[in-house]
Amino acid sequence: MTDRMQDDDALAEIFAFLALKAGAAIMRVRASGARARIKSDSSPVCDADLLAEEIIIEGLVRLAPRFPIVAEELCASGGTPEIDGGPFFLVDPLDGTREFLEGRDCFSVNIALIRDGVPAVGVVFAPARGEMFVAGSHAWTFAAEPEGGMPPRAEWRELHVRSMPERDAVAVASRSHLDTGTKRFLGRLTVRDIVPIGSSLKFCLLASGEADVYPRFGPTMEWDTAAGDAVLRRAGGVVLDLSGAPALYGKAAREFANGPFIAWGDPSAAARFRASGVC
């Protein structure tokens, strides 16, 4: 293992650099017009997904050639690697493909390193918004343009979750998957506002103290959530399954599918609501 792989902050910078390169490719495809098709799971994929994933995988292979890479489009084409309990990468090259194809800006590039079932390092980059979220030893955010570079570390803003207010809490939910279970759960909280936003940016709103809770009862995959989960955890939040246990990664027997989960900015709020029988 290289020194870079042992230093979470150095690794996070490498992830951010790869995300910038992938984001630049995505935006070039957007400018020229994306070509899309529907996969067997009824989700869309386009040439931007494939190009971005190729860029990220190439960079990760150079960085750590022995680490398995579990990437969305690679798995969709039958290239799911074997993992043996050691560290591995999770990649969603274009999270929020529907948002991308519909001309919205809430899509992101997601790269994470999993250690012992936990997302230890991750980045979420929203190229159309010029926002980078980074999880290393801490969580940070900074402005970054796809064709530009990264600002010096001194210009990164450290992220911290906020205490969940007793009233007027803010929830985030998927624009495309606001299902009955989510509505029922949110109806049992004192929520002032529900912010619909695509991709893993939902985790980042919690991490930056702009929102309080993100319930997800519909299907997701590990590559959808790992990078955002890393940012939220490093900012002080938690992602819990419905039993109250932290979300785990590396579920190869389930083809890396997640179960339902609730992401909380304030862990004490999660404990209070569990004690009250709300979740």
Image (tube, rainbow, N blue to C red):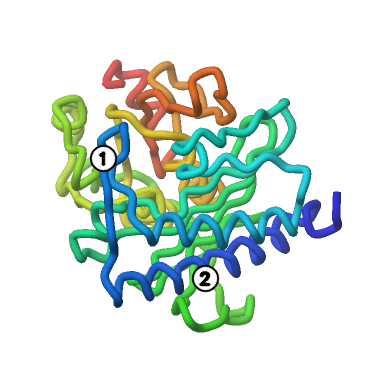
Q: CA distance from mark 1 to mark 2?
A: 39 Å
CB under 8 Å between discs 1 and 2: no
Q: Which residue is mark 2?
A: 20
Amino acid residing under circle 1: Glu
Q: Is residue 236 visible?
A: no
- Res. 139 mark: none
Give the foreground label among 1 and 2. 2
| Residue 233 image point, x, y percent | 53, 44
| Residue 149 image point, x, y percent | 56, 81
- In the figure, 263 relative to 84: above or below? below
Between discs 1 and 2, the one toward the N terminus: 2
Q: Is residue 253 visible?
A: yes
Q: For mark 1, does the 10 Å Cα neighbourhood hold few (<14), some (14 to 19), or many (20 or more) residues?
A: few
| Residue 82 image point, x, y percent | 66, 28
84 or 130: nearer the viewer: 84
Residue 265 occupies quadrant? top left
Q: Which residue is mark 1?
A: 166
| Residue 14 image point, x, y percent | 66, 64
In the image, is 248 to the left or to the right of 88?
A: left
34 or 6: nearer the viewer: 34
Residue 262 occupies quadrant? top left
Circle 1 sits in a helix, a strand or a loop, which is it?
loop
